[in-house]
Amino acid sequence: MPTVDELLERASAWIDDYWNADHLRRTLDWLLVLAPDARGHLRLAALTHDMERAFPGPDSPVADARRPIPDRDYDRQHQQRSARIVAAWLRQHGAEPELIQRVCALIEAHEEGGWPEADLLQAADSLSFLETNVGLFIGYAREGKHHYTPERVRERMRYMYERIRLPQARELARPLYEAALARIDEFVVREASRAGRESAG
């Protein structure tokens, strides 16, 4: 059977083609900042927790910013689908059943946390999200994708910051959260300026 380090190396290659792989890699990086001795199943969960989005299909959950933040139904479907996809990948690569169970239990809880390891994963996910995903969500607001507006993007960033339970992680996240809000404000100013020029022309 492969070692955890071997599985991590293979997983790193597996996520390469995912459009948001940087978020997954930074989630693992932040996990190791928070918990340098994090066990292998937690590291694997951090690196793969969103992989269902790399494999869209008829059972993919659909985001819609008109629904409440957090959208618990979406989160549940996202977590469960990611866990199924990661479990299948781990089985394909000969991982031990106990390791698969531990990885998938964490993936199925990465949005809500609920116990120490899950809270670490949730915090690392939030830190990476605030660091890497603000541009993505500003793009959603620009395009009206998933019904996002600048205010809804702000709400999303605020939720991802405020859900962090760990004091150390909350402290690390504060400057990332403030920088994300500043980028949203800059976007709003640019859009208002562009709209003004177009109306004047």
Image (cartoon, rainbow, N blue to C red):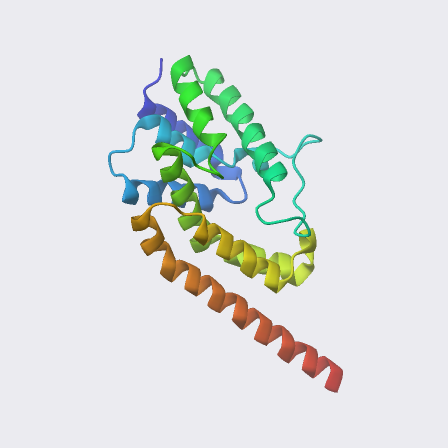
Q: Residue at x 69, y 55 (%)?
A: 147
Vertical relation: 185 (above or below) 97: below
- Numbered circles on residues, count: 0
Q: Report the quarter where the N terminus lies.
A: top left
Given residues 16 and 74, the one toward you in this image is 74
The outermost residue toward the left is: 37
For residue 50, side relative to residue 140 (left or right): left
Task: Confirm whether residue 96 shows in the render.
Answer: no
Quadrant for residue 13, please give it. Answer: top left
Image location (x, y in percent) of residue 37: 24, 34
Residue at 34% across, 43% down: 29
Residue 139 in sight in this render = yes
Pick whichever, 9 or 180, lies toward us. 180
Q: Position of residue 3 (x, y in %)?
A: 32, 20
Q: Quadrant of the C terminus?
A: bottom right
Residue 50: give x, y in percent of width and height. 51, 37
Instruction: Place residue 2 in its image quadrant.
Output: top left
Compared across the picture, whether 59 is left or right of 110 comes to right
Q: Position of residue 58 (x, y in %)?
A: 71, 31
Q: Residue at x 65, y 63 (%)?
A: 142
Q: Quadrant of residue 6?
A: top left
